[in-house]
Amino acid sequence: MKIMVAIKRVVDYAVKIRVKSDKARPIEHKPSSGVETQNVKMSMNPFCEIALEEALRIKEAGMASEVVAVTMGLKQCVDTLRTGLAMGADRGIHVETSGPLYPLSVAKLLRALVEVEKPGLLILGKQAIDDDCNQTGQMVAGLLNWPQGTFASKVVLDKEKQVVTVDREVDGGLETLCLDLPAVITTDLRLNQPRYATLPNIMKAKSKAIKKFTPEDLNVEIKSDIEEVQVTEPPKRKAGVILSSVDELIDKLKNEARVI
Amino acid sequence: ISTLVLAEHEGGAIKPQSVSAVKAAKSLSNDNPISLLLAGSGSALHEAAANAASCDPSVSEVLVADSDEFSHPLAEPWAKLIHLVQQKGGYSHVITASGSFGKNILPRAAALLDVSPITDVIEISDPHLFVRPIYAGNALCTVRYTGAGPCLLTIRSTSFPVSPILTDSKSNEAPITQVDLSTFGEDSVGKSRYVKHTSQDTERPDLGNARVVVTGGRALKSAENFKMIEKLAEKLGAAVGATRAAVDAGYVPNDLQVGQTGKIVAPELYMAFGVSGAIQHLAGMRDSKVIVAVNKDAEAPIFQVADYGLVGDIFEVIPELLEKLPEKK
């Protein structure tokens, strides 16, 4: 069985992002058009790292034959794909696009790639930390009419029965589902601790194959029914006060804020 | 304009976040018939439908889908149900709350309808213009929906607050209609099966809707020490929250995590103990009305959003608070 993993290049999670003040900016890769991305550290979306790690562990346990990492977007996304190959993915696919790319288009491109590669599992991060959409996995599952296990914190594959049991982090605790393969899984934070790429593996990754596609190759028309109008800074909270004692705190909460 | 609101229900009543979704639907337009869709099976469903019929005077109709397929919130049949009901009713908008239920189902339904969903909406400017946070709330993005198809939204219930449901307004009851499921088909049925649900049942208020939230961070050092937070919450009638670090360290279960990838809360009072204030955590609580932070590091970023800060050792401050806070009646 083959596993396909979708990975996204995003502004590194530790970067404090800056909203661009210039409204007349050029349209860049979505969703960062309103946010400074020049000379900013870019990384693999943390949830995608977890997705890739899970695929690698399934392969290492002898339950999968190959892990294919897929990315979409500008040509720089290849760097992120190389990181994925250095972590251990066997080969990569890059669908190169230039304009804004929203989850519906990503889901359609993924569906087309699934039809080419025929994986038994498609694993994605539950959300990207730039647009925080949390949509793509659910959408591609819907397009493929595959069952979905979103927000996974535990994945147990049964190769014989061709099912996967997924523990999901839901609002009121944990939910366990059993899905027939092929299936889509999206990963939550506590699924695993992703590995670092070691230097020898980074060197090895340079010779791994990356196949390029364009949306036209895959017969997917990139159109969008949403448009980013503007990006603004959130309202700032007014500065608070530092108190000196518990008594003062209780007094403020009681008599000033009137919340207790 | 007409709106379909997908509602969640539990124990024969619709959940508060679904009433928030109704409130969001009302803000789309003054002239906006709202249909509430409830699915499930058995008597609890019909009880909830009766409750939903009087939850808000602007609800014009309650649609009930009664089938064993909806006994559990599986995305496959539910997304299909939304697709079916939308196609039949021709709604211009479909709205649900942004919890794990809505986030799981609505994007799948959007894919079936071939439209882009807009998730985590915090403001509705006009029927096609919405504001949603990006980058963990460090920026706000205004999005216009330009599609010809229906506009599918999930809304943050904290941005559309509602007062507790008054179920005695029986004078204003919307008609209840059964959804015709004869064309529902079975092609996606059985590919996913519900196994179980595990939760830590507590008497405490729900984190997402609590008036007061008391949160502990990694500085609590152990699950044993975290009980102090729980005691304090009890005294204040508050819900308990935690940072990612505290959850990862195993002090409390995952569903208590507040932040970008956990719960988004906006209570009247948010008290953070031993929380440094990573941007991912701030994303989940920055809209709280009053924020209190107690941390021994005066430089901790949490103090930049706190209305009241106290620089001190939580192991001294919490016991003192427990002793001095007035008893909750």
Image (cartoon, coloured by chain):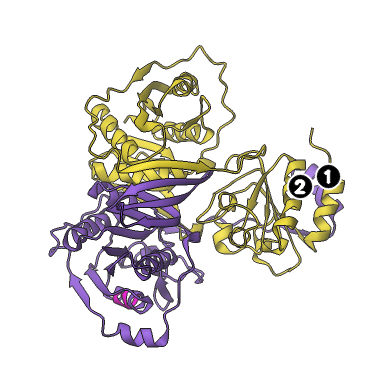
Chain colours: A purple, B yellow
Q: Is residue B262 in sight in this rendering?
A: yes
Q: In this view, does A2 lie above or below B151?
A: below
- Residues at marks 1 and 2 touching, judged by CB atoms closer than 8 Å: yes
The picture places residue B258, in percent across and down from the top left corner, at: 58, 53
On screen, residue A137 above or below B237: below
- The residue lying at 41 percent from left, 51 percent from top is A166
The chain that hosts pointer 1 is B
Residue shown at the point (76%, 52%) measured from the top left: B228
Tell which tag, 1 or 2, sits nearer the viewer. 2
Q: Residue B325 carries which label?
A: 1
Magenta-colored stretch includes residue B202: no
Q: What residue type is labelled 2?
A: Leu
- Residue on which the image places disc 2: B232
Q: Is residue A96 left or right of residue B53?
A: left
Q: Which chain carries label 2?
A: B
Taking the spot 50% from the left edge, 60% from the top edge, the residue there is: A190
> Which range of residues does the magenta coloring cover?
A78-82
Q: Main secondary structure of the magenta part?
A: helix
Residue A126 appears in view: no
Quarter-of-image position of residue B60: top left
The answer to whether residue A260 is above or below residue A19 is above
**Image position, residue A216 (x, y; %):** 13, 63
**Residue nearest the observer in this picture, A16 or B112:** B112
Q: Which mark is residue A56?
A: none
**Which residue does the image show at 62% across and 55% down from the upper left?**
A237
Picture coordinates of residue B300, whole percent (x, y) = 68, 67
Near mark 2 (Cα within 10 A), the count class, few <14, some 14-19 or many ≥20, is many
Horizontal placement of B43 versus A254: left or right? left
At mark 1, the secondary structure is loop
Q: Earlier in the sequence, mark 1 or mark 2?
A: 2
Residue A147: x %, y % from top left? 31, 47
Disc 1 residue type (three-letter): Leu
